[in-house]
Amino acid sequence: MKILKRRFAGTNVRRALKSTSKRPNDRTIVEKNIEILIFLDYMSFLQRLAEKSNEKAKEEKEHTISQKHIDAVMKVLMLVD
């Protein structure tokens, strides 16, 4: 089993989340392992995108997922999320 290395610094993620606060004096509390949660959510989204794109390609009787399949699925996924 491979061990995944971090691709980004956790402090950068926390800083970006805090900077998106709507109020300038708002002290947003960010959990300690928030970067892991964001990464897992991202991976879950990519897996859903791949599965739905594969289904779309099979509906059109194609063996390869192309950009048009991904674009069609993205429209649906982004409306749902």
Image: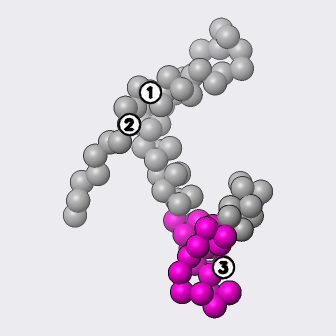
Q: Amino acid at mark 3?
A: Lys
**Furthest residue in direction top, as rendered:** 25
The residue that appears at 56% across and 76% down in the rendered structure is 65
**Mark 3, residue position:** 56
In contact (CB < 8 Å): disc 2 and disc 3? no
Please rate how many residues cluster around mark 2, counting C-alpha atoms within 10 Å: few if below 14, some from 14 to 19, many from 20: few
Is residue 59 shown left or right of residue 44?
A: right
Q: Which residues are magenta?
A: 47-70
Query: With respect to residue 56, does 74 lie above or below?
Result: above
Residue bearing the label numbered 2: 8
Q: How is the image coloured?
A: one colour
Q: In the rendered image, which residue does mark 1 sit on? A: 12
Q: Is residue 73 at least partly visible in the picture?
A: no
Q: In what quadrant of the picture does the C terminus appear?
A: bottom right
Q: Is 80 situated left or right of 9 in this image? A: right
Q: Quadrant of residue 49?
A: bottom right
Residue type of the residue flagged with mark 2: Phe
Labels 1 and 2 touching (C-beta < 8 A): yes
Q: Residue furthest front?
A: 67
